[in-house]
Image: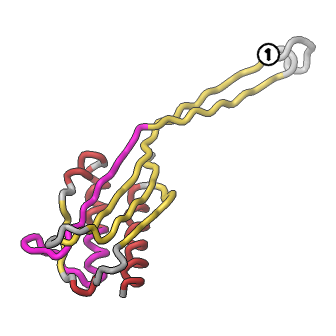
């Protein structure tokens, strides 16, 4: 059961990462002594952290993907008295990428087959993008013990 839960958790991460941008790296860890068959209910905990980092559209996609995957695994969403808390956090950083293209032409500008000095051109392309991580933690409510940790690195253009 533990191996099935761990592999299904990777599928969950891949689904969520795909909805946010290009998948680069997914890593996960879980408590190998935890008996996941004891847990029946879950709730999304503190998704406001996620809402501050990503757009409303991506926030809804991530939350809906988590709910869908947990429901597929037999868990029931219960906000009143859940067994598990699913916490999501996104950490984004603004990045920029600069590329340079050089062109060199022989001859003059107006008559390319004539003799004369060469002319060179340089084009610079600056691209702004978001680089970040989506972190999903599953915590047992009673003991406040961290059961799983999922980290997905992505680029959001």
* Neighbours of disc 1 within 10 Å: few (<14), some (14-19), many (20+): few
Please give left or right for residue 127 compared with residue 33 in the image: right
Query: Which residue sits furthest left?
Result: 80
> Image quadrant for the C terminus?
top left
Q: Mark 1 points at which residue?
A: 109
Query: Residue sitting at 54 percent across and 31 percent down?
Result: 126
Whole-percent x, y for residue 55 in the image: 29, 48
Query: Which residue sits furthest top?
Result: 116
Query: Residue sitting at 30 percent across and 82 percent down?
Result: 73
Q: In which quarter of the image is residue 105?
A: top right
Whole-percent x, y for residue 99 in the image: 62, 33
Please give left or right for residue 28 compared with residue 87 in the image: right
Query: Residue sitting at 26 percent across and 63 percent down?
Result: 63
Please give left or right for residue 5 compared with residue 45 in the image: right
Q: Is residue 67 magenta?
A: yes
Image vertical order of residue 108 relative to residue 148, above or below: above
Whole-percent x, y for residue 54 in the image: 31, 48
Q: Dot 1: what SS? A: loop
> Image quadrant for the N terminus?
bottom left
Give the extent of the magenta segment: 66-94
The type of colouring in the image is secondary structure
Query: Residue sitting at 26 percent across and 87 percent down?
Result: 37
């Amino acid at each position: 059961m533990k191996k099935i839960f761990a592999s299904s958790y990777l599928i969950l991460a891949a689904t969520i990462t795909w909805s946010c941008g290009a998948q680069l790296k997914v890593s996960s860890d879980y408590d190998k002594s935890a008996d996941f068959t004891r847990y029946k209910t879950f709730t999304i905990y503190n998704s406001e952290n996620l809402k501050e980092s990503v757009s409303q559209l991506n926030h809804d996609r991530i939350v809906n993907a988590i709910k869908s995957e947990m429901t597929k695994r037999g868990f029931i969403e219960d906000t009143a008295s859940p067994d598990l808390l699913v916490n999501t956090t996104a950490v984004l950083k603004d990045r920029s990428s600069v590329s340079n293209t050089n062109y060199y032409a022989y001859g003059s500008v107006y008559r390319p087959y004539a003799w004369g000095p060469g002319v060179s051109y340089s084009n610079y392309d600056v691209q702004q993008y978001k680089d970040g991580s989506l972190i999903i933690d599953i915590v047992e409510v009673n003991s406040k013990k961290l059961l799983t940790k999922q980290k997905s690195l992505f680029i959001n253009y």
